[in-house]
Image (tube, grey):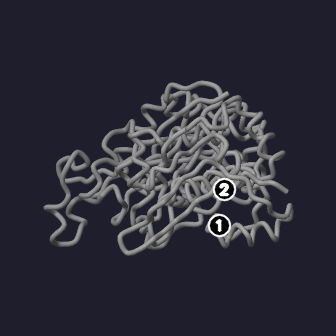
Amino acid sequence: MTSPVPTIDRSCGPSGCEVDWLTSERHQVADDVASFTAWAAERGWGDGLPLVPPTEGRVRAFLANCGRFPDEVVAALPPLQGECTVEKIAVNAVMAGTTPAAMPLIIAAIEAMARPEFNLAALNATTGSVVPAVIVNGPARDDLDIAYEVGCLGGAGGGAPAIGRAIRLVMRNLAGQLAGVTSQSVFGTPGRLAGIVFGEWEEVSPWAPLAQRRGVTGNAVTVYGAMGTTNICDMIADNGRSLLEYVGKGLAYHGANGTLPSSAFCEAFVAFNPVWAKMIAAEYPRMEDVQQVLWEAASLPVSSFPAGYDESLVGDRRIGDRMYIAQSPGDVLVAVCGGMGNLHALSMPSWGDTKSVTAGFQ
């Protein structure tokens, strides 16, 4: 079969990589997952998992679902400023195993990540274990079978893992994020394989959806620089105030990027299960008040740091004798999702030096 696989010529040496990002060329390869995966791996296009051969017909089906010209450049993605055309996105989406209907969401997420304030160049190259998380709002959650109930960040299945993988293949094959070459992430993260993609359970949330609170209604993605996920468990709190304070304290820990002098700014992200969200909203119906309590609690006394750290704890996040994880209450992002099992909140510690971006799509 004929496959419009992007030709990527990488010549890497001690001084870095010289990359020739050509228009998609056609190659005659077998329409067989096993043989195509091996063929693509030899050329550095794989991520270690099976790849769906991007035949002409499959790629055309994906292009038909986004209403954009194949050669339109969506973004020049760092670290190597690879031109990310609609066709090349489609090729990687096919290989990832997602569906044609996911193209608008994938493009919106890539456009959001390319915004200057997201600082993708630094995020893709850093030594940290960071990956852009994608939180989805709007009807697209159900249309694309993106989980937002029990197991929504892993295990529930549905369309999210393949969508996340498509974005990660774009970062690998088009942006040129290569471990040990253009990316110096010491450990990496499982999120760099399948991404982190999940929806917000808007229907049970006592507050407006995350994207709407950030100025975008309907179908939307919010991209956030996440250092993985962390569980925060509580079995004692019986009121919204105590619960919020407890969860907020779980956001602040020594070694978090928000405490580093190298981080010019930092955010925080919390996802509440529906049971806890209802309990909190009974006392705090305004999201601004929820963020205020979380922000105040997400801080550490300067005296708790080892000797020699005091002089480094400077900047907007230090107020008096406390070091705050985020600059302001508005930098604490809150969503509602997950199962009805109670007992747990989820945080995604921020890499810092990147501001989350929300973008709509049709």
Residue 72, horizontal then vertical, whole percent: 59, 35
Position above or below: 201 against 80: above
Position above or below: 351 against 110: below
State the residue in front, 260 or 79: 79
Q: Is residue 77 left or right of residue 265?
A: right
Report helix, strand or loop for mark 2. helix
Residue at image coords 66%, 52%: 166
Q: Mark 2 = which residue?
A: 165
Looking at the picture, which amino acid does disc 2 mark?
A: Arg
Q: State which mark lies toward you, 1 or 2.
A: 1
Residue at image coords 58%, 61%: 191
State the residue in front, 236 or 361: 361
State the residue in front, 216 or 291: 216
Farthest residue, direction bottom: 14
**Do the residues under discs 1 and 2 have CB atoms within 8 angstroms?**
yes
Residue 80, horizontal then vertical, whole percent: 45, 55
Whole-Å distance between the Cαs marked 1 and 2?
A: 9 Å
Q: Mark 1 = which residue?
A: 47
